[in-house]
Amino acid sequence: MSPLAQVAVTTLKGVGPALAEKLARVGLETLQDVLFHLPLRYQDRTRITPIGALRPGGDAVVEGVVAGADIINGRRRSLLVRLQDGSGTLSLRFFHFSQAQKEALKRGTHLRCYGEVRPGATGLEIYHPECRTLSGDEPPPVEQTLTPIYPSTEGLTQLRLRALTQQALAWLGPDSLPDWLPEAMARDYQLAPLDEAIRYLHRPPADADLEELAEGRHWAQYRLAFEELLTHQLSLARLRDSVRAQQAPPLPRAARLPAQFLKGLGFAPTGAQQRVGAEIADDLTQAAPMLRLVQGDVGAGKTVVAALAALQAIEAGYQVALMAPTEILAEQHFLNFSKWFAPLDIEVAWLAGKLKGKARASALARIAAGSPMVVGTHALFQDEVQFKNLALVIIDEQHRFGVQQRLALRQKGVAGRLCPHQLIMTATPIPRTLAMSAYADLDTSILDELPPGRTPVTTLVIADSRRMEVVERVRAACAEGRQAYWVCTLIEESEELTCQAAQSTFEELSLALGELRVGLVHGRMKPAEKAAVMEQFKAGALQLLVATTVIEVGVDVPNASLMIIENPERLGLSQLHQLRGRVGRGSAVSHCVLLYHAPLSHMGRERLAIMRETSDGFVIAEKDLELRGPGEMLGTRQTGLLQFKVADLMRDADLLPAAREAARQLLEHWPSHVTPLLERWLRHGQQYGQV
Ligand code: ADP
Ligand code: MG
């Protein structure tokens, strides 16, 4: 038999060009694709339940005789069919029905139905059951296996998918679907044969443990999850190797510029900054591209570390690009670097999406001519941006950018030949599980020390019934010359509603605190307006800043020592931690008030309690991951990387070390198995290992 990866779906009965095109849209082109298109869940149609034994809630197959069918003109017109089997009566209700359907369901008809049993106006009911009329003396047998429900797309029915997988399964065997995990590995990690696992998951026997399957704990799922995680590790290893195999410009350790810079800085670097700085400086001297992630809690002083790295490249005569995920943050970096680098005679160029016309053309020209320090947003990724000799790319707040974007910048090397070094900085401490999967292609440094003189933030959890007290607290703080943030959180995923809420909070607080200068910044404002408001707040011209979570990242106003977060229960813990990091940056005692809306769920209370109890970003990140799952934590843009077919990072976290070790063995002893695995699992639109 030919390998299923090479047999086109059109080989299957009933698959013409039109259907093949539909299938291609969900990534099903070969029989291997069809077999790796696994059910999302299962229905149990393997037994007929007597009507008298039905319970509301679950799905069931019932068989009986129609005792009557009437059109009910209630609030919604419906066809009500009463079905009896000697043990009881059940109602089948149809809100949409044709005359032909009504006639087919007339009294005396023998029916087999499947659907969800629910309590209704007439007792137990099934809405829109799947029905089959039975005739003759011999009723057809019930299903022998659990019924798979596949992920689908418009125009592709479950019946169609079932028929296709049924045919494809007939081709399945150990020869047609090679098992790329060697026998020794299968033994060590107790992996079932691949074809058995696949067959099982498409058609589990009637006695399969549905609960185990639903929870993803079944041996067949374990077999596939292991292979998928292993393959993901392989892809990251490939990616890393292919980057490492490229040439980067070796940058000798700098002396003059860093010394000058530190002298002008006004403070001494912390021990952690020195240690991480040395790690980076060392990487940069190499001819292989650096790939380093710096994790440091909010306020740890990552920017200084970035500046030191930049100076090493600049002193060697190369260009540096620094990129941040939002315009506000990028602009803050631009201002910082301009201030720091002006005394060193280093020009800083600025590029963002909003830069248009002449200013843009001039920025592009300066970058192409070799402007040493370039700061901007993702606009730096665009094709029209040409660097003269880019040697170092610094990405701030990494979790907002995806792996693909990281790759895009790598490609902007020195004249396209050399690959730039890459430094990634994140304030979201990354739990180990995630670091092992999402960032396994990077080396990691941790800035585990805050600069001296910081006073820890005291966090208070207060119900919004005490809102007026909190407003008075803001008045008192500002009267003492402090500044405060009032943060409005996301409402029902709607930015529009959230901005409206911020607007009315702004009006309310302006009124209540008439003597204070109050500002407003939200996501619907033009970047220039936002920047202007932020600037006024930084300069102290505004005392209270009402904001949506746009201030989350990076904004630095040391005099702000009070933050109120409304409805903190709507945010993830890491996000709260980020926000809270905006205060406690100066010497004043800082407070963060979590102004929640009662009643809180048990989990909600637990989450806010964690915020009150700890300011350790790692502890918070672990809890966040535990409570919310990885997709949420990394932000939607990143999740593409983590959309596994079978595996689930949370559930299967304990498989990761083994999958990683197995990947290493495979690379070493069975290198020829690597590519087929990558093709099997990552075939569609993924660039792994082909930088
Ligand atoms: P983050 O790690 O959150 O990006 P920043 O780089 O913005 O932190 O630094 C936060 C603040 O701490 C800035 O005002 C910065 O100038 C200051 N800072 C950084 N390093 C030190 C240090 N070693 N001593 C004192 N202040 C520092
Ligand atoms: Mg920062």
Image: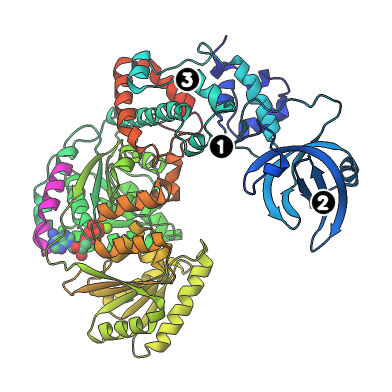
Relative vertical location of residue 374 with respect to residue 525 in this rendering, above or below: above
Tag 3 residue: 194
Q: Nearer the viewer, residue 31 or 533?
A: 31
Marks 3 and 2: in contact by CB < 8 Å? no
Q: Percent position (x, y) of residue 537?
A: 31, 75
Q: Nearer the viewer, residue 77 or 548?
A: 77
Chief secondary structure of the magenta portion: helix
- Quarter of the rendering occupied by the C terminus: top left
Q: Percent position (x, y) of residue 470?
A: 34, 81
Relative vertical location of residue 15 with respect to residue 63 in this rendering, above or below: above
Can you tell which mark lies on residue 40? 1
Q: Residues within 10 Å of mark 1 (few under 14, many from 20)?
A: some
Relative vertical location of residue 49 with respect to residue 472 in this rendering, above or below: above
Residue found at x 76% / y 45%: 88
Can you tell which mark lies on residue 80? 2
- Going from N to C along the chain, the mark reached first, 1 or 2, is 1
Q: CA distance from mark 1 to mark 2?
A: 32 Å
Q: Over which residues does the magenta segment extend?
A: 262-280
Relative vertical location of residue 45 with respect to residue 457 in this rendering, above or below: above
Q: Does label 1 point to a residue whose CB lies under 8 Å from ligand 2? A: no
Specify the color scheme: rainbow
Q: Percent position (x, y) of residue 543?
A: 31, 81
Q: Nearer the viewer, residue 345 or 671?
A: 671
The residue type indicated by label 2 comes to Leu
